[in-house]
Image (tube, helix red, strand yellow):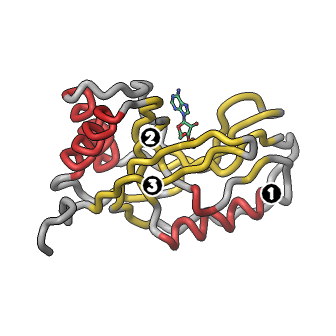
């Protein structure tokens, strides 16, 4: 099963990012992603088996225990790839809480022998794929209001001709970590 772990966005931030994406989609071709798919990837695991999936869930719980809310502050637009065929993203400004969470997650995954892509974190929300970024200037853009993120989810990603389908498998909200069956 193809999986990744990502920080989820509060609804207001996602709404603002979707409004930004709508403005951008008027200025360029591209496959703009549905708002509900927005996330900030903390670790891409790729294919894992059942045992690794259970270990990844444990790692997620451990990494979030006592974690602090992550400040979300827009840090401009950016791209991966060529301007003629780019992944277009909204950057998220570096923050110690975010760096710490991603670092802890990676330590917890490594301790449990769960494989993941160890490339340095580049905090971003992907807005569009296969975008053709114009050379002329973009319209005036309103960026999302600053916010805080408190949820991390282990996602299953299924590749489809129309794009990836993301299915949440396990979500942890910081400070309220509770396993299934535990009394509330
Ligand atoms: O967070 P975004 O949407 O930018 O591009 C994939 C997506 O990134 C990325 O993981 C996220 C969930 O699929 N991804 C896919 N393959 C990857 C790889 N081998 C990868 N990230 C790192 N290494």
Question: Which residue is at a point 80% across and 57% down the rendered structure image?
Answer: 25
Give the label, 1 or 2, closer to the camera: 2
CA gap, disc 2 and disc 3: 10 Å
Question: Which residue position holds label 3?
Answer: 168
Out of 164 and 14, give the one closest to the viewer.
Answer: 164
Q: Is residue 43 placed above or below 21 in the rendered structure?
A: above
Question: Which residue position holds label 2?
Answer: 4
Question: Which residue position holds label 1?
Answer: 25
Name the quarter showing ligand 1. Answer: top right
First-in-chain label (1 vs 2): 2
Q: In which quarter of the image is the C terminus?
A: bottom left
Question: Which residue is at a point 35% across and 54% down the rendered structure image?
Answer: 170
State the image quarter where residue 16 is shown: bottom right
Q: Position of residue 154 (x, y in %)?
A: 39, 48
Q: Label 2 neighbourhood size at 10 Å, few (<14), some (14-19), many (20+)? A: many
Q: Position of residue 149 (x, y in %)?
A: 38, 61
CA gap, disc 1 and disc 2: 27 Å
Circle 2: element type: strand
Question: Which residue is at a point 40% across and 41% down the rendered structure image?
Answer: 42
Out of 43 and 149, give the one closest to the viewer.
Answer: 43
State the image quarter where residue 180 is shown: bottom left
Q: Label 3 neighbourhood size at 10 Å, few (<14), some (14-19), many (20+)? A: some
Question: Which residue is at a point 66% across and 51% down the rendered structure image?
Answer: 127
Q: Position of residue 179 (x, y in %)?
A: 19, 59
Q: Residue 128 carries which label?
A: none
Task: Please indicate whether residue 17 sits to the left or right of residue 148 in the image.
Answer: right
Give the label, 3 or 1, closer to the camera: 3
Q: Can residue 181 be seen in this view?
A: yes
CA gap, disc 3 and disc 1: 27 Å
């Amino acid at each position: 099963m193809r999986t990744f772990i990502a920080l989820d966005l509060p609804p207001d931030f996602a709404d603002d990012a979707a409004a930004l994406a709508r403005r951008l989609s008027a200025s360029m071709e591209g496959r703009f992603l549905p708002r509900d798919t927005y996330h900030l990837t903390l670790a891409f695991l790729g294919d894992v088996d059942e045992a690794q999936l259970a270990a990844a869930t444990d790692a997620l719980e451990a990494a979030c225990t006592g974690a602090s809310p992550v400040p979300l502050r827009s840090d401009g637009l950016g791209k991966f790839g060529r301007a003629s065929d780019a992944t277009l993203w909204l950057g998220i400004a570096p923050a110690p809480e975010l760096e710490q969470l991603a670092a802890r997650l990676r330590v917890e995954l490594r301790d449990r022998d769960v494989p993941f892509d160890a490339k340095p974190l580049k905090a971003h929300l992907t807005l569009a794929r296969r975008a053709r970024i114009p050379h002329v200037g973009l319209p005036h853009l309103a960026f999302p209001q600053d916010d805080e993120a408190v949820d991390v989810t282990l996602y299953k990603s299924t590749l489809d001709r129309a794009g990836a389908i993301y299915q949440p498998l396990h979500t942890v909200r910081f400070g309220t970590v509770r396993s299934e069956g535990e009394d509330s």
